[in-house]
Every structure is written in structure tokens, then in C-alpha cells.
Image (cartoon, helix red, strand yellow):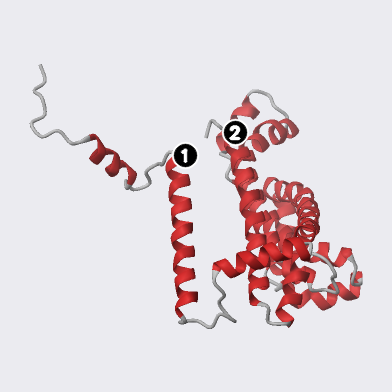
Amino acid sequence: MRAPDINPVPAEKKQRARLWQFRGSLSSRAEIAFGVGGTLVLLLIWELVARSGFANPTFLPAPTRVLSAMGMMITDQKLLWHAGISTMRVWAAFILAAVMAIPIGILMSSYRPVGASLEPVIDFIRYLPVPALVPLSIIWFGVGESTKIYLLWLGTFFQLVLLVADDMRRVPQEYVEIASTLGAKPRQILKDVAFRAMLPGLVDNLRITLGWCWTYLIIAEIVAADSGIGFVIWTARRYMKTPEVMAGVVMIGLIGLLTDQILRAIHRRAFRYL
């Protein structure tokens, strides 16, 4: 018979120890609580710094001023309409990049001649700064929507294709050997074994590169644009309307955060076995 513990550890202490355990886990409620709490603390610090006079309000407006500017822009400057235009541009460029990058990346990692032919070119282009290519994009495509889509695509495709190739390379060789032993043909191995095995990582990388695509929005929408969040931010910058500039930036962040959380939920639901 086991002797009772002389000094039992309280349940709250055990829970606190698990909470701060290295690589521990949190419940959904705890994650939400920490996320909201951290955001509120950051906003409070920002508000206090802006109100205390340590920073010039022209350069660092308080969060309350930014929120007020955002409300005014929604009602008077059609901010939500501009946000919708920007969202459509980002998704158009991102879908185009994904449709091209996924098959190319899979072929690069599956067949070495394809990878050896394309990797040097892709590695070279992905290090080119997108802003430096704006003049060329105007020469090639003019100043219409195609230029904006092209710049967003340019900042996404070459990064994504290498991530897709790495996802395919991470598929264990044992899976391929077992499928070959069972009589599967190369096309079946690629479609039914390798692609299914890389799918969780692929969806996660698509979520990450969508965020990258948003980071090029300002560059794309300063090219003779008359709509979009980038256009709104750039116009406010000319007149030193810092609260409106930051309101536009915050709007981009809110759209990105919402999209990211939706994609995370889809990933968890689709790949519950991970």
C-alpha cells in the first residue's frame, strides 16, 4: 500500500508549473487571455508614452487618436471600400503565385534535372529587391492593375516555390519505398503518397507567404493608384496626417490577423492527426 504524500503539492501550483513548462501547452481560453492581455498592456504603454509628452504626437499619436482617425476614415473616406480593393489585389496575386509555385516546387524536388535547372534562377531573382523593379514593371505593364498584381506576385512567388520544394523534400523516403514495394506507379506515388504527406506543411507555408504578400501592398499601390489602403496611407503621408497613416497600417494588420486566424483554424480542423 502506497504511503500518502506528507507534503502534497497544491493543484494550483501544479497547474502554474505546467503553464510555464518548457514547450508546454495552453488551453484555448488561456491563449486568448494571454493574447488579449499582452495587446492591452502594449496599447496602454503606447498611450502613456504618447500622452506623457516624451514623443511628439505628430510622429507618435496615441492609440485613441488612431482609433478616432480610423472611425472617421471609415465613414468619410471609404476606408472599408479601399480595404476591399486591397484584399482582392492581394488574393489575386497570391492565388496566381500559389497556382504556379506548387507544381513547380513539387517538380523541382521530385526530379533533380528540373531542380538543378531552376534553382539558380529562382535563388537569384528572390534576392532582388521588389522596389528596385518598380520602374521595369511600369515599362512592361503600364500603370494599371496588372502592375500592382505583378509586384505582389513578384514578392510572393519566388519565396513560395522554394518552400514548396522543401516541403516535398521533407517527405520521408520510406513512404516512397513502401509505395514502390506495393506496386504504385511514380504518378501514384507523387499524387497519393508524397503530396498527401507534404500537405500539412504546404498549407502552413501558404499561410505564411500570404502574410508576405501583404507586406508588398504599399509598394504595389503607390504606382499610379487611386484606390486601396496603400493609396490611402501614401496620400495621408503627404500631408503629415500621422493618425490616418497609422490607422491604415492598423487596418492592414487587422485584416492580416483575421485571415491568419481563419487559416490556422482551417489547418487545425483539416489536420487533426498532427
**Which quadrant, please, contains the N terminus?**
top left
Q: Which mark is residue 269?
A: 2
Label 2's element? Answer: helix
The earlier-in-sequence mark between 1 and 2 is 1
Whole-percent x, y for residue 98 in the image:
75, 50
Q: Which mark is residue 28?
A: 1
Residue at 63%, 56% in the rendered image: 254
**In the picture provided, is 46 more to the left or to the right than 84?**
left
Q: What amino acid does circle 1 point to?
A: Ser
Whole-percent x, y for residue 20 in the image:
32, 48
Give the CA distance from mark 1 to mark 2. 14 Å
Residue 113 position (above or below residue 149) = above
Rendered image quadrant of residue 141: bottom right
Q: What amino acid does circle 2 point to?
A: Arg
Rendered image quadrant of residue 157: bottom right
Residue at 11%, 29% in the rendered image: 5
Label 1's element? Answer: helix
Whole-percent x, y for residue 272 in the image:
55, 31
Viewer-nearest of labels 1 and 2?
Answer: 1
Neighbours of disc 2 within 10 Å: few (<14), some (14-19), many (20+) = few
